[in-house]
Amino acid sequence: MEVSFHKEIQSLKLGDGDIFHGEGILAVTKALLQSGVAYVGGYQGAPVSHLLDVLVQSEDILSELGIHLETCTNEAAAAAMLAASVQYPLRGCVTWKSIVGTNVAADALSNLASPGVIGGTLIVVGEDYGEGASVIQERSHAFALKSSIWLLDPRPDLPQIVKMVEKSFELSEASNTPVMMELRIRACHVFGSFETKDNVAAPKSTREKFAEPAPFDYARLAHPPVTFLQEGDKVNRRLPLAREFIAREGLNEFMGPEAGEIGIITQGGLFNGLNDRLADAGLSDAYGDLKIPTLVLNVTHPLLPDQIVDFARGKKAVLIVEEGAPEYIEMAVGKILRQADLQTAIHGKDMLPMAGEYTAAVVGRGLATFLSRYGVDPGELGQWLEAVDTNRTALAARDAPALPPRPPTFCTGCPERPVFTAMKLVKEETGPMHVSVDIGCHALATFPPFSQGHSIIGYGLSLAAASAVSGTQVKRPFTVMGDGGFWHNGLLTGVAGSVFNQDDSVLVVMNNGYSSATGAQDLPSSKPKDSGRGRGLDMEKALRAMGVTWIKRVDNYRVANLVNVLRDARLTKEKGLKVILADGECQLARQRRIKPAMAKAVAAGERVMRTRFWVDEDTCTGDHSCIRLSGCPSLTIKPNPDPLRTDPVAHVNNDCVGCGLCGEVSHAAQLCPSFARIDIIQNPTAWDRARRGLSDLLIKLCGGETQDRPTRTPTAQGVPAE
Amino acid sequence: MNAPIKTETKTRPARLLIAAMGGEGGGVLAGWLTEAALDAGLWVQRTSVPGVAQRTGATTYYLEFLPKTRPTRPIMSLHPAPGRVDVLVATELLEAVRMVNLGFVTPDRTKLIASTHRTYTVDEKSAMADGRMDPAPMIAACKDFAKTAIIDDLSAVALREGCHLNSVVLGVLAGSGTLPLPVECIRRAMEGGKRASDANGRGFEAGLKMTQDRGPVPDLGGAKVKPTLPEATAPLLPPSPETAFLPPEAAGLAAEGMRRLTDYQDAAYAADYLSHLKRIAAHPAASPALLAAVARHMALRMSYEDTHRVAELKLRGARMARVTAEAKARPGDIVDVAEYMKPGPEEIFGMLPRALGGRLMALSERRGWGKLSFPMQVKTTRFSGFIRLRLLAATKRWRRGNLRHAHEMAWLSGWLDHITRALDIAPEAAVEIAETAKIVRGYGSTYTRGMRNWRLIAGEMITPCLDGRLPAALLADGVLQARLAALKDPEGQALDRVVESFQKAAKG
């Protein structure tokens, strides 16, 4: 990891009465330290990566508090860590991106939830839902329901989030049940403040170790016959205990007047947006001074039937604001009210959409419908919605062309881009092939200009996903996987499975040295450095040990060679799994390291060679084949300086890091002679100058022009976005 | 055009939405504003949806500010609401319009600050011709839907100041007075922040000055702002005495063509060009548009990019000045240019005398040498590279006898013949036929593909119509459709479909 979190770490050291300023997920991290956790683990993924990233660099805090930190190889490993709290009174927390991470962790979660815990356990899931999400849209709620894990969905205000983290450990211990807290993307990134407390060291920890293991107790194992007892224990003992705790501690919040004809029940995480729309309707203000009874569910599982019944009693109707499908809360409330024989009407998904993020306009429309139905004038809310529609009509009337999308792309100089360039060239040569795609930066090759891939079925699962394909296609399929996916799941699920079943396919592993898509965290195969967790595990050795014999290592930036290796893998008579290890360090991480180092060297007067690429506008004919084979952000277009031509010419802007792909592509694809590499020798030596001087002299003697070296300082030195 | 949206009471927060692209510094900008608000003693909330969008994808940052008038904490929204955004900042023009289209810019409320520069999307820049969106309607949309608009090329300012774009945006935002933040607080936040640097300081002050130069905020009405955009269309070229016989649309282009071809080969070669033009111009049906198209495309095709030409262009002195400027070399630095070249059989044998080259090309095809080529990096700034290109450039004197030239001239006479014959029977088709020259260009595989497409159009559409085997009335529209289709996808699928349906329709 090449990013430093020095500032964030300082805010984790704040004590009683200090004010913390920062993002939601960092507030959660601080709350963990205030809660006396003994261990923390997880697997990186937006929007919760930050929790682990910061702790990894907080060695002094961890050692002072005796916290064991694990950067797990996948979410199942993280969930399995919680086993420590099954037998020992240890508080622990693990984190990952959901729904995907929860899916991976499911096995361990079920086996954890069945015996339950004696030490408080918290699972912080980044609910990757709505705008900005990078995964399938499902709710984590289902897991909480089926495994009897309590689910928190706190109001996205830092003091409230912190309080809920602290209470979650108590709730977990009071009911012997693991607790899950879901935080949506915007809540993880929300910047706010809260008053901190001192960090608390756990009674038992890496500093104060247990002298002996827990005595043997079959009842704590998730193994028959006790699993039957545990199933009963969940509903007969733990559930009532949890409800009692939630009610006693007032974890759910009643807002607004006690009485009213109608009321609202909302997930805590959606409260802020709802309040804004209620303010529009004149039913609240910026301080949450509600004029309509509202029950804010900071705990969305279990629900408290008494609480719901009390809230609904005497009301004509309640609106349930619950994001995503299925509508678990709405169904549960329906059952609760039916059993209580209350005739309060229930609205939710009849007025709000079944699917999709509950954005401002979506919530506004649902709320206005609800209010109007029960004779409450939505006031300004209605006028606002009308104005939104009028504006939309005005926009549509302009008949403007649709805007091209701008999905994320590979970074400038990304080592994965050349691999897809080579795959595109091979495709042009030998025809289309089935490509099984994985999760990671390389999935961006599904966007233009590469637009390739037939399936994405899970992290590290691309090779397994190609197994039945390879058996039923004449042409050998290709599989792409990152080193992240390789260690997460791919080595066993994919490689071992493929060798075991003697599949005939090709696996390309992007060996960029980090878990790049999630923020360049270290992986088992990351190079060991002064800091960080890399251990340098050898993928090639692992593959050989698994029985893979056809392994080729390639330098990603040598496209012509890559094309040969890919073609060979595609056409070779050799059966079985063929693995290409595509080597190239994540450019984002690399630049973070070398840019400051280079600047330092230049300032110190050392000889430094800087390289970037350049397009000769005189020879570029404006066909843009080069762009269709690259898509690099720094390879763009500019107006054609030739008065006879109208199409824009290709142009390399100043973000270029000199990876060399442009030149390699123009060679490999025999494109055109417009690409040139510019080498800038900074602080040249006397030898450099002498050689250049001699060369210039010879050129002049042969009638050529030479460029005098610049003698004035150029105006611009920075790297502005062009 | 919109129904008025009522302004709410002063207890509502000020709302700012920033539209940016990942990795551009939008997060840093939002961070500076957060710090400034804390410094100013405001309640502030900021949120974002970065995710993988940090990889240059479109993304947004959303902030709310509220004065501390009560001791209680306010409840602020995490989502921007359409029609409820007070200030919209966009670091790029298309992203500004994206926000307009999503309803986040409304005439009753939104003060828009946007940079007019374009960072082209992959769709736009990978098009085979010109895929760029027209900026004029985009700027108009920003102006029409905003209450006030500051629209200018902030990227050019960043380039001039040598700083990141976000510091200029911060300066403009500070100077615009659209947020309840004192300029001093914003400046302090930037200076005390993680990314403090002299460059960012310069950018901030430059941005601030831009707004001061424009006067008080209400006068920043978008309608008065004249965008400074890169000129996409060619400037009007001056004609020469020799080309005065042509209409003004064509005369300047022809004069440029003469200059180009004299430089390319010699005056005699340019005279050939002129005589072809004269022949076409003499036809009574020749329109100014046709003559302009012929003047343009014939000059380009006659100055086809062969090895001699490329070598010559790469030794031009003016080029080195551009390289040095773009490379941002410092005084005393040594700048080297290594050209990526990869001549294959076509480039090498093309330089040989027609008969010899032809025999060798035939041999090459029999032996399958087509894929053989010689990748090289030629350092034109060093003598070893210079002298090689110098020799290649010098041998252009024998160009008119070489194989490639014979091919090009055969193509040219075919193209001119089509135009002349079309003038007789379907004059409106002549200009479309002239424009087909556009699809023949480039090098290597691009040239091969273009030639394949052109032959398809010529063989399946133009010739049959001119020969009377297919109705000539369909020719103009058919060729236009085909030419557009040829520039749609590199595989030529769109063109194949157009040609097929043309023949179906023509055969009735």
Image: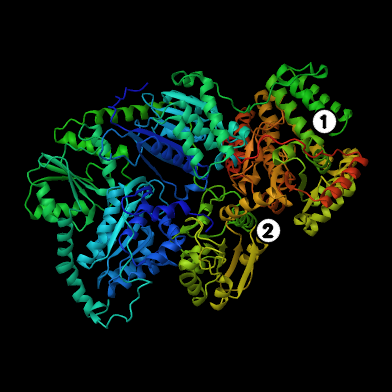
When the figure is inspected, residue B342 is found, relative to residue A530, above or below; the finding is: above
Question: The disc numbered 2 marks a residue on which chain?
Answer: A
- Percent x, y for residue A628? 61, 46
Residue in the picture at 93% in, 41% down: A701
Distance from disc 2 to disc 1, alpha carbons, whole Å, reads 38 Å
Which dot marks residue B261? 1
The quadrant in which residue A214 appears is: bottom left
Residue A453, visible in the rendered structure: no
Badge 1: few (under 14), some or many (20 or more) residues near its Cα, within 10 Å? many
**What amino acid type should be assigned to the residue bearing mark 2?**
Arg
| Closer-to-camera residue (A30/A348) | A30
Nearest the eye: A503 or B155: B155
The structure's colour scheme is rainbow
Mark 2 crowdedness (10 Å alpha carbons): few <14, some 14-19, many ≥20: some
Query: Is B433 left or right of A156, judged from the image as shown?
Result: right
Q: What element carries label 2?
A: loop
| A232 w.r.t. B491: above or below | below
Instruction: Identify the residue position indicated by label 2 in the image.
Output: A558
B306 left or right, relative to A413: right
Q: What residue type is labelled 1?
A: Leu
Q: Nearer the viewer, residue A336 or A497?
A: A336
Residue A654 picture location, percent across and down? 64, 42
Answer with the quarter of the image where residue A173 lies: bottom left
